[in-house]
Amino acid sequence: MHNLLQQIISRINGTIALSFSYQAEDTAVLHLLSQCQINSLEVFTLDTGKLFSECKKLHTETEEFFNISIKKYLPKSLDVENLEKTLGDWGMRESLANRRLCCHVRKVEPLERALKGKSAWVTGLRAAHGVTRSSIQIVEYDEKFNLFKINPIAFWSDEELFAYIKEYNLPLNPLYSKGFKSIGCAPCTRAVKEGEDIRAGRWWWENPEHKECGLHIKEK
Ligand code: SF4
């Protein structure tokens, strides 16, 4: 796969960004990228202020493993203050609008800053993640952020992903061994039962077609 990724990346001028969100997918993609020749790469994370402590530990482990620095983009403090006044600790669960507002302040606006000036955005998205991602391609053009979006493991199965992590002994979020299959902010993510959908533990009170935070929605 890294040969295909190298071919894609070689056609891109400018800085390539990898969004790292403490999931096995991101680590696998980071490992693929580490085998490519890239002129300018920024690995970044969106530090929403609501991350699990396990993610913070994985941040350091990943930096050490790959000998890189993962840049943190934080939400604007005044926006967070206003958000907390409006929603309190759990208001994001009370309505879709509240949840989207929280995601906008803590994720979407920081992502806009992270992607500004970048030529391509590499992600760990997989079609297996569910209805909102079933049509993704390995290379797409993201009209919302106006850049190429590269999803190198778009068609990997769960088995392929975790076999890859094991083969290269890559750092893995300990939340997976606690029953989590997809990892996001602590108030909005729970462990799932065997047989449940990969993203069943994300915003579990919402309908499946709403389960996106606004980072990967195809609209301007
Ligand atoms: S996932 Fe939950 S806590 Fe995180 S930004 Fe979205 S609504 Fe807020």
Image (spheres, rainbow, N blue to C red):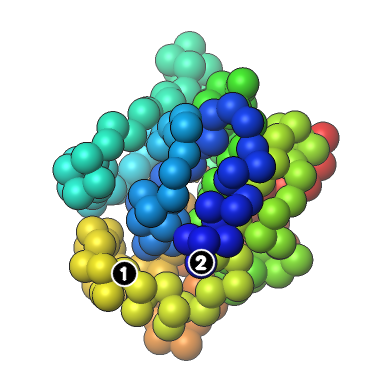
Sequence-wise, the earlier of marks 2 and 1 is: 2
| Whether residue 65 can be seen here | yes
* Closer-to-camera residue (73/3): 3
Secondary structure beneath label 1: helix
Q: Point out residue 161 in the picture as x, y percentages from the top left corner.
A: 42, 73
Q: Residues within 10 Å of mark 1 (few under 14, many from 20)?
A: some
Type of residue at label 1? Ile
Q: Quadrant of the C terminus?
A: top right
* Closer-to-camera residue (169/97): 169
* Closer-to-camera residue (80/175): 175
Q: Is residue 107 above or below residue 79?
A: below
Q: Is residue 193 above or below residue 110?
A: below
Residue in view at x 47 percent, y 23 percent: 75
Is 174 left or right of 48, judged from the image as shown?
left
| Whether residue 203 can be seen here | no
Secondary structure beneath label 2: loop
Type of residue at label 2? Met
Q: According to the image, label 1 marks what residue?
A: 165
- Can you tell which quarter of the image residue 146 is in? top right
| Label 2 within 8 A of ligand 1 by Cβ | no
Residue in view at x 58 percent, y 61 percent: 4
Is 35 left or right of 128, judged from the image as shown?
left
Q: Are marks 2 and 1 in contact (CB under 8 Å)?
A: no
Label annotation for residue 1: 2
